Image (cartoon, rainbow, N blue to C red):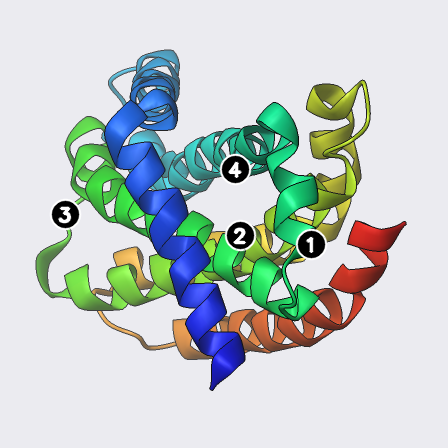
Amino acid sequence: MPELFYALTLARKDLLQERRSRAVTVATVFFAALVLFVLAVALGPDRSALQEAAPGALWVALAFVGVIAAAQSFQNELEEDALEQLLIYPVPRSSIFLGKLLANWLYLALLGAALLPTTALLFDLPLGGATLPLFATVALGTFGFSLVATFYAALTANLRARESLLPVLMFPVVVPILLAAVRATAEIARQGELGFSASWLQLLLGFDLVYLVTCTALFHVVLEG
């Protein structure tokens, strides 16, 4: 499919660019680790309190760094009018969105996978046999978050106050995904298996599908507006 090829090509370009510069990686990894550390210290030595707060702390850190990563993905295209040149190519606008989405999601999902053991260590959270379900939750949650973040990053890319407008506009929309991800993570960490978290994962998947269809369909309006 041509659209898929264009999307994969754009995602590969973004990932290679980040691999060379490491601008986002250095900032987000340090910031995410700092957020987790500060929250763990603030909660004190109470083991039960730490374990209770661990899922929320993980997704707070991912949400903060996700905004930075999404904003930077379009900031790079604004240099030397690269975005305007990209729009000249006879490719579907949905391919541009899917390419940016794929790059942002892969980066955020990998970061989430790396933060899981860090969270377990700082918040004294035993993972046990829950590792794979937790990775699946991170994958679904970061996908939904990346959908909304990529869409609104494109919407605010040409605005002067884009750094402050992006979180203000996107967080009210992404709250259901974050809540479902936190609840699913908490249930899995508590029970060591899917259990009751299956319903939260189904809800998370439902949000992902709805946002995927909506954002892909409306993306051409964002670029041409």
- Along the line of sight, which residue is nearer the eye, 135 or 20? 20
Residue at 58% of width from left, 35% of height from top?
Answer: 77
Q: Earlier in the sequence, mark 3 or mark 4?
A: 4
* 3D distance between C-alphas at marks 4 and 2: 11 Å
Q: Earlier in the sequence, mark 4 or mark 1?
A: 4
Locate residue 84 relative to residue 123 in the image: left or right.
right
- Along the line of sight, which residue is nearer the eye, 117 or 82? 82
Labels 4, 1: front one = 1
Q: What amino acid is found at the position of numbered circle 1 in the picture?
A: Ile
Q: Does any portion of residue 169 appear in the rendered image?
A: yes
* 3D distance between C-alphas at marks 3 and 4: 35 Å
Picture coordinates of residue 52, whole percent (x, y): 37, 40
The 10 Å Cα crowd at callout 3, few under 14, some 14 to 19, many 20 or more, is: some
**Disc 2 designates what residue?**
146
Callout 4: helix, strand or loop? Answer: helix
**Disc 3 designates what residue?**
126
Q: What amino acid is found at the position of numbered circle 4 in the picture?
A: Ser
Disc 4 + disc 2, Cβ < 8 Å: no
Residue at 49% of width from left, 38% of height from top?
Answer: 66
* 3D distance between C-alphas at marks 2 and 1: 25 Å
